[in-house]
């Protein structure tokens, strides 16, 4: 039986659904103390007075830590989380990157609301919180920059001395002859788009628990961390300790959606070493909403050139990214936007400039979609605007501009940020598009829409497509071992936070080894398991971890066959493996179990290995992708708008997805449903609001709204898979794409519903207030 592609039940569900999961907040150690963090109440200012005397005297307080206590011992963070930008990418994109320096604790200035100023360590969280109230801090407020336009204006305060003009990085790239395209075009349009700031909002807030063992000089740390190996390298560098002396464990995690390395993950283990006590810090939800994973927040100025038949021949975009107070991911978000801006469309003449601007907000980090959501919103709105200008059906204009399937693989004429060329490796976009329209009964909807309008109802249909560079490097590792009982153990450098690693990686190993996934244990999220690991981000786990597990398991299979050939005195070509046994073809009674082979593969006098073979049934493989694979999808949304109050109800939603080889359809469908829900939140509800002084006005779920079950309609998912030629299993990523298209599809559906009014929408989220104002503006203009 082949297990890859089968809907086997998730192996993770039993312990999670029966309450046996273990999260950072569940772990308690002897002599453990707890931390609370004093955070800046202002967005920009100087610290003119800081006194911790009263807090230190409070009963139960172990220590109060400020930047002065860290000076010369640890910090600041000066290495960006995405550090490798190939030289030829920098040259060809006119890349400019300024230095990066982030404070662990505020030294002389604060640069955003919520920036850590001091840490209280106490016998419990209650005492630690009380101690924070006793710390005396006086600030001298400075002008706050709350949007990139104000940060770029002449005379604006410069936030960091080595970032002139507040521009942390910029690039300019493109393809084809953009000036010639605009000169030859029959029509041109300009538009400006605003993509609001949102928050990842995982179910579990962040947590860190660190313990230092003086006898072994080892730090063991539990953290809600997607990249434990990366965190280990940062701690090694910043604490001056060998990596061998640092162990990072990522236990069960209630989601993540992006991040990087956080201040707390550096100073909590440092303080555990200094104080000789285990220290735990658990983030509360207000801290999470103000200090964790902010994202999106882009401003686009777009020009498009096209002909009367709807063919788009040129696209220009200059966009700003509000990077926040620091920009640890450099060009990750901005270049992702540029690289995905043309989507599934054959637009060969292209010019794009991206600028990351520092402001007094929380850092802008990758969250599910990571720059692609903004790109897709912009291009899909542009395509529908072209259709509206020409009085054509949007589906007709989209179909005309899709890259034909027979042109695949298709070179988009520019570089990806990993240094490879952007080449869509496989797919058939027109076929995918037609399947999505059929799934949503697009033609039938048009008839139903006419009837609804006659009844006074405003219903509309909107389409969005996306591509996603997935399976990002630089590497991923896996070890596969068979123990003496014949059981298979897989160690992965990619750790899960909801992606079903235990299930799908066991399916991959099962096929390579000829054994049931029930006899395979998958372990991950621990730097002690494997020396090098990449982590889980950028829709990479299936591609990179799956390929590494396949490689390691294939090596073990080859070793099994070589040993069995020696023992059974037949050639390897005459052997077959099934259900954990090696059998001679045509002689089912002549076989060896994995346990029997493992026994003779062990070192010692009973070992019977081919000459030169190392003992043990264990192999490690590191998969290094040549470049990213390109998954894709087409989404169709059907909505109803109440024009009197501006509310939008998503009635039905349809997805056709191409993620190459599907490892487990149930898991992929779950990713699609979750992604659509996430995208609906970004489309209609989620927006971080700051006032002119840089205060975060909605750091609670009372004010920052995320979708509930009542906001998410039935989601119909189908697949049209085209294998990738770039990895041994033909996989493309599936974790992020479904969150990318909903804002664009819903925006286009709203426009379609309100087409009699000639409403235009250029900003997300599309809150009731914004939709209502757009309707009123259209009515006042005679719409």
Image (tube, rainbow, N blue to C red):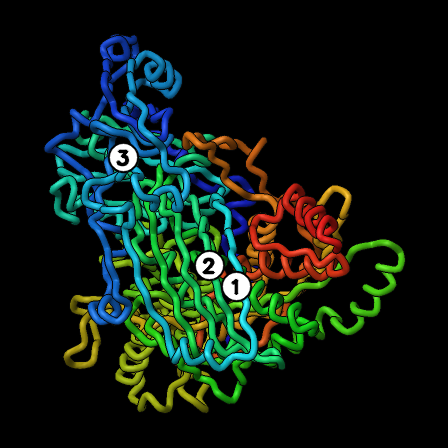
For the question of whether residue 728 can be seen, the reply is no
**Which quarter of the rendered picture does the C terminus lie within?**
bottom right
* Residue behind mark 1: 190
* Position of residue 431 in the picture relative to residue 278 (left or right): right
Give the residue drawn at x 34%, y 48%: 357
Q: How crowded is mark 3: few (under 14 residues within 10 Å), some or many (20 or more)?
A: many
Do the residues bearing badges 2 and 1 touch, measured as CB atoms within 8 Å? yes
Mark whose residue sits in front, 2 or 3: 2
Give the residue drawn at x 64%, y 61%: 748
x and y percentages locating residue 266 in the rendered image? 24, 38
x and y percentages locating residue 397 in the rendered image? 63, 76
**Viewer-proximal residue, 595 or 159?**
159
- Marks 3/1: CA–CA distance: 53 Å
**Viewer-proximal residue, 746 or 536?**
746
Can you tell which mark lies on residue 654? none
Total numbered labels: 3
* Residue behind mark 2: 301
- Marks 2/3: CA–CA distance: 47 Å
* Position of residue 75 in the picture relative to residue 721 (left or right): left
Mark whose residue sits in front, 3 or 1: 1
x and y percentages locating residue 346 in the rendered image? 50, 79
Q: Is mark 1 on a helix, strand or loop?
A: strand
Q: What element carries label 2?
A: strand
Give the residue drawn at x 39%, y 17%: 126
């Amino acid at each position: 039986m082949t297990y890859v592609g089968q809907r086997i039940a998730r192996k993770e569900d039993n312990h999670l659904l029966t309450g046996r999961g273990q999260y950072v907040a569940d772990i308690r150690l002897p002599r453990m103390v707890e931390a609370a963090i004093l955070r800046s109440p202002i967005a920009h200012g100087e610290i003119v007075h800081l006194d911790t005397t009263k807090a230190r005297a409070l009963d139960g307080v172990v220590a109060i830590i400020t930047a002065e206590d860290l000076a010369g011992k640890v910090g600041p963070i000066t290495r960006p989380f995405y550090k490798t930008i190939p030289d030829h990418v920098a040259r060809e994109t006119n890349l400019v990157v300024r230095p990066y320096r982030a404070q662990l604790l505020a030294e002389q200035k604060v640069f955003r609301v919520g920036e850590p100023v001091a840490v209280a360590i106490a016998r419990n969280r209650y005492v630690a919180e009380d101690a924070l109230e006793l710390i005396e801090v006086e600030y001298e407020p400075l002008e706050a920059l709350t949007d990139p336009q104000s940060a770029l204006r002449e005379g604006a305060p410069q936030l960091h001395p080595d970032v002139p003009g507040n521009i942390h990085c910029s690039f300019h790239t493109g393809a084809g002859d953009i000036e010639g395209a605009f000169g030859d075009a029959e029509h041109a349009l300009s538009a400006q788009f605003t993509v609001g700031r949102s928050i990842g909002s995982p179910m579990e807030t962040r947590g860190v628990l660190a313990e230092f063992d003086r006898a072994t000089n080892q730090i063991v740390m539990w953290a809600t961390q997607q990249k434990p190996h990366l965190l280990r390298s940062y701690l090694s560098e910043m604490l001056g300790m060998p990596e061998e002396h640092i162990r990072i464990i990522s236990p069960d995690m209630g989601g993540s959606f992006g991040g990087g390395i956080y201040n707390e993950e550096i100073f909590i283990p440092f303080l555990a070493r200094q104080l000789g006590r285990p220290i735990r810090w658990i983030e509360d939800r207000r801290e999470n909403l103000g200090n964790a994973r902010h994202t999106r927040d882009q401003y686009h100025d777009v020009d498009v050139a096209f002909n009367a038949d709807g063919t788009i021949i040129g696209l220009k975009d200059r966009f700003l990214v509000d990077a926040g107070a620091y920009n640890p991911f450099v060009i990750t978000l901005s270049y992702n936007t540029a690289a995905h801006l043309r989507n599934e469309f054959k637009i060969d003449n292209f010019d794009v400039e991206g600028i990351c601007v520092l402001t007094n907000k929380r850092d802008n980090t990758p969250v599910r979609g990571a720059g692609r959501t903004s790109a897709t919103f912009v291009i899909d709105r542009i395509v529908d605007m072209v259709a509206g200008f020409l009085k054509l059906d949007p589906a007709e204009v989209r179909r005309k501009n899709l890259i034909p399937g027979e042109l695949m693989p298709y070179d988009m004429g520019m570089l990806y940020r990993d240094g490879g060329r952007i080449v869509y490796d496989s797919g058939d976009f027109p076929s995918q598009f037609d399947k999505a329209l059929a799934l949503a009964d697009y033609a039938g909807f048009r008839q139903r829409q006419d009837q609804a309008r006659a009844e006074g109802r405003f219903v509309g249909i909107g389409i969005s497509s996306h591509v996603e560079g997935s399976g990002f490097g630089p590497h991923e590792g896996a070890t596969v071992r068979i123990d003496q009982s014949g059981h298979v153990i897989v160690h992965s450098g990619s750790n899960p936070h909801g992606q079903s690693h235990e299930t799908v990686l066991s399916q991959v190993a099962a096929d390579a080894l000829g054994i049931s996934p029930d006899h395979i244990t998958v372990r991950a999220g621990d730097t002690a398991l494997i020396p090098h690991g990449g982590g889980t981000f950028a829709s990479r786990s299936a591609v990179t971890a799956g390929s590494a597990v396949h490689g390691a398991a294939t090596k073990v299979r080859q070793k099994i066959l070589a040993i069995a050939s020696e023992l059974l005195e037949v050639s390897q070509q005459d052997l077959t493996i099934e259900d954990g046994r090696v059998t001679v073809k045509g002689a089912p009674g002549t076989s060896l179990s994995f346990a029997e082979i493992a026994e003779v593969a062990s070192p010692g006098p009973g070992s019977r290995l081919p000459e030169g073979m190392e003992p043990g049934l264990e192999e490690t493989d590191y998969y290094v992708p040549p470049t990213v694979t390109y998954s894709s999808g087409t989404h169709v949304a059907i909505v109803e708008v109440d024009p009197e109050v501006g509310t939008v109800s998503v009635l039905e939603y349809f997805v056709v997805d191409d993620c190459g080889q599907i490892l487990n359809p149930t898991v992929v469908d779950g990713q699609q449903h979750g992604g659509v829900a996430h995208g609906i939140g970004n489309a209609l509800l989620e927006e971080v609001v700051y006032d002119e002084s840089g205060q975060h006005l909605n750091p609670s779920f009372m004010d920052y709204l995320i979708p509930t079950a009542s906001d998410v309609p039935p989601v119909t998912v189908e697949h049209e898979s085209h294998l990738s030629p770039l990895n041994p299993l033909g996989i493309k990523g599936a974790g992020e794409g479904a969150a990318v298209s909903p804002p664009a599809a819903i925006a286009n559906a709203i426009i379609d519903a309100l087409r009699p009014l000639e409403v235009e929408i250029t900003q997300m989220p599309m809150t009731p207030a914004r939709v209502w104002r757009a309707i009123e503006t259209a009515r006042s203009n005679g719409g």
